[in-house]
Image (cartoon, rainbow, N blue to C red):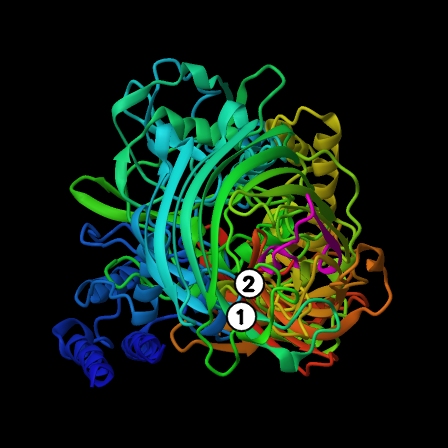
Amino acid sequence: MRTGFSGFARFAAVRAGAGVVVAVMLVATDAAAPRFYPDDPIWTDDDRAFDASGVGTIEDSNGYDFVANTFSNPGERRDVRAPNVNTVDELPDSSWFTNRIGRRPMSVADVVRGPDQRDGVDMAGWVVSGGKSSGVQPGFRMTDSSGQTYQIEVDPSSNPEMASGAEMIGTALYHAIGYSVVEVYLTELDPKTLVIADTAMMRDPLNGKRRRVRPRDLELVFERAARQPNGRYRVLVSRFASGRPIGNFRYYGTRPDDPNDVVAHEHRRELRGARVFGAWLNHDDSRGVNSLDMLEAAGGRSWVKHYMFDFGSILGSGTVFAQRHRAGNEYIFEQRPGWLTLATLGFYIRPWMRIDYPDMPPSVGRIEAEVFDPQQWRPEYPNPAFDNMRSDDAFWAARIVSRFTDEMIRGVVAKAQYSDPKATEYLGDVMIKRRDKVVKAFINVVSPVVDAGLDADGTLRFANAAVDARAATPPAGYTLQWFAFDNATDTRRDVGDPVQVTSPEGRAPAELLTGSDFIGVRVSAAHPDHPGWSSPASFTFRRAATGWDLVGVER
Amino acid sequence: MARRNAVIRVLLVAFCLLSSGKWSGAQTNTPPTRADALHAERAAKAQALAPHHPNALESGLNFFEDRAVFILDREGFYPKLGSITVGSGFAYGLGFRDRDLLNNYGAVDMWVAGSTRGYFAAEGRVRFPELAHKRLLVEGWAGRRDYAGEYFYGLGTDSQRADQSDYGLRTTVFGGSAGVRPFSKLIVGGSLEYLHPSVGRGNDDSVPDVEDAFGEAEAPGVSQRADFLRTHGYVELDYRQPRYPRQGGFVRADVSHYEDRTTGSYTFNRYDFDVRQFVGFFAGRRVLGLRGFVSTTDEREGGVVPFYGMPTLGGNDTLRGFRMYRFRGPHALLLQAEYRWEIWSGLDGALFYDAGKTPLERSDLNFDGLERDYGFGFRFNTDNGIIFRADAGFGSRDGPHLYLVWGGVF
């Protein structure tokens, strides 16, 4: 144990030293760097620029991930703006995230299709090519005639359709949000038709040694699986991502061997904001070991692409059992409730123990929306990025969640093909209610003023994301404080007195429009239910040939 | 030293970067665009790449999950660790197993082990637990058990702790069983077993041997050895949810006929009935477990029941406020109640109450004159059962007892 902690200390020291490097560089850069570069705001972060072919594999064990995150507080816990957002407080596309529903309209069909490149899979000619290497869901690997590999997984006999349904829903929604996910399909399979390739190998579950796949191995998979009335088995088919797997990413630190990975993961906006998505979908299993890094290559260069992986344990699914009552409500190890329970001989009852789940088909598992409190939601154990989530991160994520319409949600649930309509209806209802709660909880924590635009004549128009999402009533009015901004010295000078407006628009002072190349306005509002609105959102505009371009947003 | 070197290395990199042409003139070489600034940041890191070096904790836990688990639970030769029987102390030895016999339908397991209390056992067992689409269970075994220090206090509930004696019980056994599962929760089965027991001196020199302290009348079978052919039938209904139960129950009835093949004097029948019920509340994180166990014997053809074939009470899984095998008699009644509450996932607290007796007459199998204890404990568990528990028993006439046990209670 002592050795372990000295290892941790060394790791922390290296991290601290690296922090010094980055800090010194940032200071050196900041000393001369303008707040806004000519190409701001950027919408693509070229984090594939440097060849990363030398990266090694980081494959954490479940035990290490749990212990490290539960007892050692890895990563930096600091209230700092996510370094990877652009100057308008949005996330550029990168190897981690691709803006989809948050930045462009998506149809219901687009959302439902998710990452899938085809309508379904035809398993004719496929062969069993290996065992399943990770996860608790029983399964194996198959390869099609073109050599493409797929992972095949079955549902537990106690909860038919549950885990595969969760995978279908999670994959489609996380894809629409913007994460990289693998293609997944549902199909039926008759075990009698399976052909095992001569080269199919697996790790023997009894001794850990590699050996050939035997027919009995497949029988054991299907013995634990839910069998359909027609004698066949519903299976989830996951297409292997392209590239070479190099393990998982962590929700803290950076890969020391990846030149493109320069932002500490615990500060990445998309990983911090994943807490909001996790709360919505009860993705309590959102942790490093359920991520996937793939080394992709093209044009003589390699880079790491980061995937969210394994959605079998979201919503009401615990993958091989209905989700536990604790899931989403409390960490596996959380000191206070544990000690309280111990001291009171169990007379202290944790609130989640009192939740009464409705009687639903087994395919639903265990999920509800009535007691659900988005602010209190928790994954299985602490997540450094989630812990670092700030109000602006939460707002960014909540705004994305608000883009999912009822039709999209019901369309995605329908994609899970639950045989019992009651399951489909209930899950749709629950997800819609949880969406509304999540949006209301997180979109109002800061000023929800968005989409500010300044016309050439000085007319300002903006929107209220919370009102648009029906998560709040409109305020009585807004307060505007105009300012001039000097990009060379990074200083602001207020121009005029604060102005009260009753609608989401205003007019810039005339003298401001003819002076500085950068001008801005701070917009705040007073709402009795949302004190976070009183903290202003700041919008900075840069003079352009035809008017003013939005170049800066801060909340 | 390693930490200092690591910091020095990183600071050197920083110095080199800052003193390089590009960054020493940062104020004059400001990147012209955001893209250039980000590119420069990555260029700097590209100069300082390092492979990932797992720390000791990471290496250790990864090794445990990836390899060590297969060492403890490995196929082929494996370390036999744990316990030989209740009260044996920690046992260690060597085993060999093959759990994918006949295309994974069967398993063979052979082991030999000795324990810290001088116990020794060797056993070979072949099991086919899921034949005929999981409807049929077949098993065969052979073994030698040398239990070097079993305790005996006399028969009946009135036995005194001051009368403690010990004996060694050495048994050679072989047999086979078969069971059918009409449905998944019910097993009906039977077995045939040959036992060659031998009572000898115990290994605890602080107490007298049973043959010195008790005569044949107080300890039937102590002076004369016999071989037995045991014919056994059972019915078991197991509807616990999950195996470490939060709800459900377990019912088992056993009927055994021990036929004395040597003297004919010790032929007897034994009947055991075990009922357990678990009531979970507050999402199953609070569980009330109840158990009732009755065992009774009857001698046949004018013989007697040997003392080592009688039911016993006392110890970590029956009367926890008493020593191991503290009570023994031709009949036994045990009542247990346990309230378990989940402190954290994988750790339960427990309050328990045990009561029982080992009367000499079957007519005394009632609630009068029960020996009692109460206590508390902790259980490290998974859904599949208790891995380790600590139970402290109080309130008995034999004083407090602490049991640290690998495995469950009921």
Q: Tell me which chain the residue with mark 2 is part of.
A: B
In this view, the residue in front, B116 or B52, is B116
Q: Upstream in the sequence, badge 2 or badge 1?
A: 1
Tag shown at residue B222: 2
- Residue B125's place in the image compared with A422, above or below, is below
| Mark 1 residue crowding within 10 angstroms, few (<14) / some (14–19) / many (20+) | some
Residue at mark 2 shares a chain with residue at mark 1:
yes
Direction from residue A115 to residue B233 in the image, left or right: right
Q: Measuring 25% from the left and 58% from the top, which residue is drawn there?
A: A258
Direction from residue A372 to residue A287 in the image, left or right: left
In this view, the residue in front, A462 or B24, is B24
Q: Position of residue A210 (x, y in %)?
A: 26, 40
Q: Which residue is mark 1?
A: B211
Q: Given the image, on which type of amino acid does mark 2 rest? A: Val
Direction from residue B198 to residue A407 in the image, left or right: right
A506 in magenta:
no
| Mark 2 residue crowding within 10 angstroms, few (<14) / some (14–19) / many (20+) | many
- Badge 2 marks a residue whose secondary structure is loop
Q: Measuring 31% from the left and 60% from the top, which residue is drawn there?
A: B63
Residue A455 seen in the figure: no
Q: Quadrant of the N terminus of chain A?
A: bottom left
* Residues marked 2 and 1 touching at CB (< 8 Å): yes
In this view, the residue in front, A473 or B283, is B283
Cα–Cα gap, marks 2 and 1: 6 Å
Give the residues in magenta. Answer: B283-311
Q: Position of residue B171 (x, y in %)?
A: 45, 54
- Residue B396's place in the image compared with A384, above or below, is below
Residue B178 seen in the figure: yes
